[in-house]
Amino acid sequence: MLKKVLIANRGEIAVRIIRACAEMGIRSVAIYTEPDRYGLHVKRADESWSLGEDPLAGYLDPARIVNLALETGCDAIHPGYGFLSENSRFAQLCEQKGITFIGPRSDVIQRMGDKTQARDSMRAAGVPVTPGSEGNLADLDEALSVAEAIGYPVMLKATSGGGGRGIRRCDSPAELKTQYPRVISEATKAFGSAEVFMEKCIVNPRHIEVQVLADQQGNVIHLFERDCSIQRRNQKLIEIAPSPQLTPEQRQYIGGLAVRAAKTVGYENAGTVEFLLSGNEVYFMEMNTRVQVEHTITEAITGVDIVREQLRIASGLPLSFRQEDISYRGYALQFRINAEDPKNDFLPSFGRVTHYYAPGGPGVRVDTAIYTGYEIPPYYDSMCLKLVVWALTWEEVIARGKRALDDMRLHGIKTTANYYRQILDHPDFRAGNFDTSFVPNHPELLDYSAKHHPSVIALAIAASIAAHAGW
Ligand code: ADP
Ligand code: ADP
Ligand code: MG
């Protein structure tokens, strides 16, 4: 078993990994840059090391991080998500220096991180992919002729993209002409690569993804699917497991496809295979070669601790479960509580958390790195808390989600919590009838009044009486 792990990340996912290490008797080492000095991961790890003043450079410096792991006597690095988690050169450097990278081999990261190479591998393995360009697009002329051949609307996508960025829908040649240079420039800025490719736009699909686990002995299993169709601008807001809109046959078929995808590329560790579903058609979209933000809801319905399995696999141990041992129970929802103002075009709302009261009670889990008095730095992701609820039935999980969102108090910053409450009240959502067009098609859900909890109103009245009475 691994003895000491450096966590090359920050925020809630660093805390999540530290917790798994603590339960397994593994020592944890945190890294931080100065704006994160008061971060929870710094306080929770067994050791913490500063990587300088710059808010980002330290988290993105492979050589420095690997050297620190060596100097502090770590035998492994967990990359979390984002940052260097899908950087194949980072994984390769770990391999060269004899540090275990908690993830797949660097060549697998490289292959799956390149969306056109990943599509090639899947086609060869007989996994259906969306129709599109053979590889990357050479120029606008090729883009126009591929679009003509597959038919509009099309999606222009950054080959190295992630986090929902570098993706544009084009409904006509004119739109393609304007979007083409934009996507290239966005891809270059965000991902350091100008490569783009094209896919047929699947109109109003559902985003269905499958969690897989693969050990070094060649065993591959899946932990069923997550429905991430509730998205805004290709970014997930609310995730659901299992999908309330799959038949048992579809569930079995898509799980099988994900296992085939992972086996085809010699996958190891935890990963996610993302698909688009339209009617009965399933298309491979991409594979994320890391732990995902929404792994929590799969943990809730299966009882499997995914980060624990990651650490076991990286230690060379076989999977704790066979496919037939895995079952699921009930439903789970995850709300990505973002420090954003939904009423102001989701403008980031960083600053001090003046008061935070965690929701609780049955079936509620919170993964976060915030606390009362914490100042959310403006340099990173706006996601500041993941609220996960579980219940036996779809109706109950929605009720529990509303209750937990009401339970939570997060003052000092604007968040997406009240907006999510509106989504839970929508009849289509409640009927389990939604696709990726749900959020853009329901702008009226943004038209809520910020509700004040009775206790807050009572406090305000008490304060005003006190003021009048001259207390
Ligand atoms: P998930 O796939 O786990 O649902 P997201 O797509 O929301 O997660 O991405 C999680 C984090 O990782 C976000 O901060 C996102 O910006 C970042 N991220 C994802 N892919 C990439 C990438 N290819 N390059 C840089 N950052 C990425
Ligand atoms: P990222 O790496 O940024 O997560 P994905 O390829 O997973 O990018 O796509 C993100 C989202 O964009 C999907 O969940 C889906 O909503 C939308 N999308 C991507 N490709 C297509 C497509 N071909 N047709 C329709 N929607 C798409
Ligand atoms: Mg994706």
Image (tube, rainbow, N blue to C red):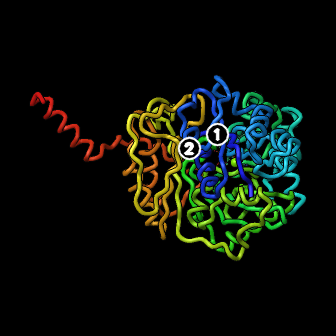
- Give coordinates of residue 465: x percent, y percent: 13, 34
Q: In percent of the image, x 73 and y 70: which residue is there?
A: 253
Q: 41 and 407: which one is in front?
A: 41
The quadrant of the rendering that contains the N terminus is: bottom right
Looking at the image, residue 295 sits to the left or right of residue 451; the answer is right
Q: Which residue is mark 1?
A: 30
Q: Secondary structure at mark 1?
A: strand
Q: In percent of the image, x 41 and y 56: which residue is there?
A: 360
Q: In percent of the image, x 82 and y 47: which residue is there?
A: 109
Q: Residue furthest left?
A: 469
Kind of residue indicated by mark 1: Ala
Q: Please tell me which of labels 1 and 2 falls first in the chain.
A: 1
Q: Is residue 64 visible?
A: yes
Q: 165 and 219: which one is in front?
A: 219
User: How many neighbours does mark 2 have within 10 angstroms: few (below 14), some (14-19), or many (20 or more)?
Assistant: some
- Residue 42 lies, with reference to residue 239, above or below; the image says above
Pointer 2 residue Cβ closer than 8 Å to ligand 1 = no
The answer to whether marks 1 and 2 mark residues whose Cβ atoms lie closer than 8 Å is yes
User: How many neighbours does mark 1 have within 10 angstroms: few (below 14), some (14-19), or many (20 or more)?
Assistant: many
Q: Which residue is mark 2?
A: 44
Q: In percent of the image, x 24 and y 42: which residue is there?
A: 457
Q: Is residue 114 visible?
A: no
